Amino acid sequence: MKDEFAFIRSIQPGSHHQPTVVAGIGDDAALYDSEDGWHEIATVDTLVEDIHFSKKTMTAYQTGHRALAVNISDIAAMGGRPVFYLVAITVPKSGTWTEDELGDIYRGMGDLAAKYRMDLIGGDTNSTHDKLVVSVTVIGRVEKGVKLLRTNARPGDSVFVTGPVGSSAAGLDLLLNKGLEAGKENKWAAAHQTPMPQVQAGRIIAEAGLRTALNDISDGLASEAHEIAEASGVTIELEWERIPHELDGEERQKEWALFGGEDFQLIGCAGKEDAKKLRQLFEKDGLPFYKIGTVTEGSGVWLTEQGERTRLDKGGYNHFT
Ligand code: ADP
Ligand code: MG
């Protein structure tokens, strides 16, 4: 990168959507107002080249989209609306990423941000002798009193998901084996490259004001179910036949649907009657809602398939193993 300051100027937005911004990019830190009656939500996720993304499977634009999407998804899982984002980017000195490509990363983020009227209010620019690192922080807001925590599941609850799982894993497999070209206009590849966070679903759940445990599915359905089961001290029973996916006929469909992750659908638990209310609210807004299991007393996660019940491991990807 020739000039860090010129780069920052090039990605600085000319105006803001959010009236609560007092000072965005250009000073020591961003200054913004909170809103009466709302909790602030903060989340950060870092994407490292060749661990979380690669030029072999994603364009720069898609990398930007994805880097922001994974963070918005965490806000969605708290029932919040995303409001601001900050981007720390660490650029290889080797020049493997051109300024145009870096610009594309910001365009990928910017186009997704515009959908939610989010503003870029800051960041940091660094260089490295290693790979590209993109770290995005998102600030969101949710109505005071809404706490969609993973500790909220209770025996008797229904378990639900907001959409099909496993497509992203199928897409990544396709891209790794057949390359970027093969991924064009492919539904699975798009699920991997440009995932859509389930903000609308999260907002319906928040506004319903019902006790709900909610997680976004970043590490796989099994892994997220385990997190809720552990945090709430309950057993989660899943039924394979009820789990929505778009992988019919695929040999690895179970692996992808249960352990794939990164589809960024939401998994939740709510009282049986409350889940029915949620289904109605989702249907009213034209969104799908799938009951995939139940919560019982105990611990761990189980999967029933054709009447046969087996323990379901976390599986998925763990950075410490
Ligand atoms: P400081 O030395 O005070 O940290 P910087 O030069 O790092 O200032 O940043 C100047 C301004 O530009 C700040 O508002 C900062 O948030 C913003 N900024 C820096 N790098 C980026 C980036 N990569 N993306 C978005 N905003 C950035
Ligand atoms: Mg700085």
Image: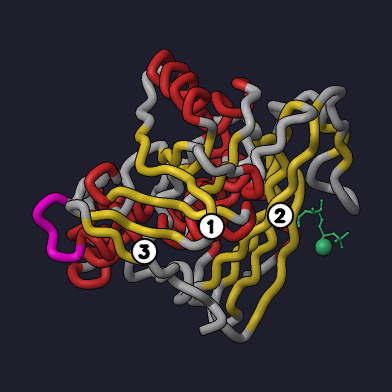
Tell me, yes or no, if residue 111 can be seen here: no
Residue 89 lies, in percent from the top left, at: 65, 64
Q: Residue furthest top?
A: 284
- 3D distance between C-alphas at marks 1 and 2: 53 Å
Query: In the rendered view, would you say 11 is above or below 131?
Result: above
The prevailing secondary structure element of the residues shown in magenta is loop
Of circles 2 and 3, the one toward us is 3
Residue sitting nearer the eye, 239 or 121: 239
Verify whether residue 138 appears in magenta: no
Q: Is mark 1 within 8 Å of ligand 1?
A: no
Of circles 1 and 2, the one toward us is 1
Q: Quadrant of ligand 1?
A: bottom right
**Residue 171 falls left or right of residue 118:** left
**Residue drawn at 56 percent across, 73 percent down:** 132
Secondary structure of the residue carrying numbered label 1: loop
Verify whether residue 251 appears in magenta: yes
Q: How many marks?
A: 3
The answer to which of marks 1 and 2 sits earlier in the sequence is 2
Query: In the rendered view, would you say 216 is above or below 83?
Result: below
Residue 33 lies, in percent from the top left, at: 88, 31
Q: Which residue is mark 3?
A: 259
Q: Which residues are magenta?
A: 248-252
The circle on residue 8 is 2
The amino acid at mark 2 is Ile
Q: Which residue is mark 1?
A: 298
Secondary structure of the residue carrying numbered label 2: helix
